[in-house]
Amino acid sequence: MPEISLSLLLPASEAFAVQIVDSEPIGNALPSLMRLDQRLRADALQNSAVIVAQAAEIGSATLHDLGARSGDWLILLARRFTPVQNAATLASKTGVIFTALPDDAESLIISDNVPLASLLPALLALNAPLAKLTPKQVMLAVGRSVIDLERRPRELGIKSGDLLGVMPITPITRRVRLRLASPRALHPPFVVENSPAILGRYDSLLTEKAPDIDLTDALPSNKARAISRRQAIFTEQDGVWRVMLHPESGVPMFVDSRRLAPDRPMILAEDNVISFGVSPNRPDFQLLVRLETP
């Protein structure tokens, strides 16, 4: 019975039906979406999380069936809106439900093989306004933080009736440990608990100390210089781990298929694959992301 760590959101406020162009970057839609919530301002985006969530049928389906993984969001809200219908008639636009999410969340460790219908009574009881509603009056969604706002709705699989949310980030009292493992278990995993942490390799010819995450002994002999001495910076805040390219790095680095930049941190999620080299399809070296709650 695998357990996963989720951030639970129980907003009792209404949601708003809007339309966004599915061929344009998500970031283009955010200013108008943020105006729907008086708590958010255009300059507050850097301190907010953008969440894309797919509505789930509350029945025998489980979180495992929905592909939920640690680091995702479990969202339960009152069904006080009418989802946009007949998305095919919207041509280049996709109807999306924007929900004004609360500015806090609680950590939830939960089994991923329990039917959603069985979870619902316990979830409703956690929020007084929602506790008065019946299962038919609420909707449940599983979401992930959007890392790259240049991605388009169609690339993220967004469809009419799904959720697009902007949530101010405030501290969540929880601790998450980062493990960077070899996809083929060729070397012991690197456990990262301190933030910030620099990933790289040690060069005995230099007087600099070894990086916090030293890949020197993990690199294959024919790839001894597959990464830079200072390759990446990992940071953790409020239980969320991020990574960005180190300014001194000369080696390309990818999170799944997204290329890192020195000034654009990316949020890490369970099962992300970090690749080093000119292409994520033919990497020189890879690490697999694991997130653990001690």
Image (cartoon, rainbow, N blue to C red):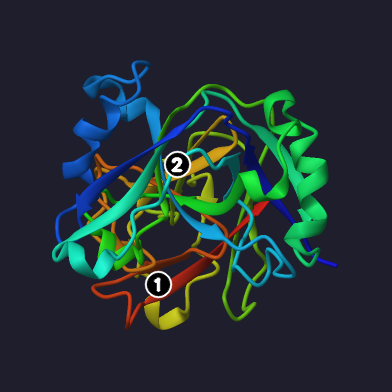
What type is the residue that disc 2 sits on? Phe
Locate the C terminus and report the quarter of the image it occupies.
top right
Q: Which residue is mark 1?
A: 224
What number is the disc on residue 81? 2
Q: Secondary structure at mark 1?
A: loop
Between 169 and 58, the one nearer to me in the picture: 58
Between 249 and 288, the one nearer to me in the picture: 288
Do we see residue 279 in this rendering?
A: yes
Residue at horizontal 61 percent and vertical 63 percent from the top: 57
Going from N to C along the chain, the mark reached first, 1 or 2, is 2
Residue at horizontal 63 percent and vertical 41 percent from the top: 7
Q: Residue 42, relative to residue 92: is it above or below?
A: above
What number is the disc on residue 195? none
Name the side, left or right, on which 182 lies relative to 201: right
Residue at horizontal 53 percent and vertical 51 percent from the top: 213
| Quarter of the image where one finds residue 202 | bottom left
Q: Position of residue 165 (x, y in %)?
A: 40, 40
What type is the residue that disc 1 sits on? Ala
| Quarter of the image where one finds residue 263 | top left
Q: Residue 62, relative to residue 126: is it above or below?
A: below
Label 1, residues with CA under 10 Å away: few <14, some 14-19, many ≥20: some
Residue at horizontal 76 percent and vertical 32 percent from the top: 131
Locate the N terminus and report the quarter of the image it occupies.
bottom right
Between 174 and 228, the one nearer to me in the picture: 174
Label 2, residues with CA under 10 Å away: few <14, some 14-19, many ≥20: few
Name the side, left or right, on which 105 lies relative to 274: right
Q: Position of residue 149 (x, y in %)?
A: 26, 48
Q: Residue 163, relative to residue 257: is it above or below?
A: above
Q: Position of residue 275 (x, y in %)?
A: 39, 69
Cα distance, mark 1 to mark 2?
57 Å
| Quarter of the image where one finds residue 186 | bottom right
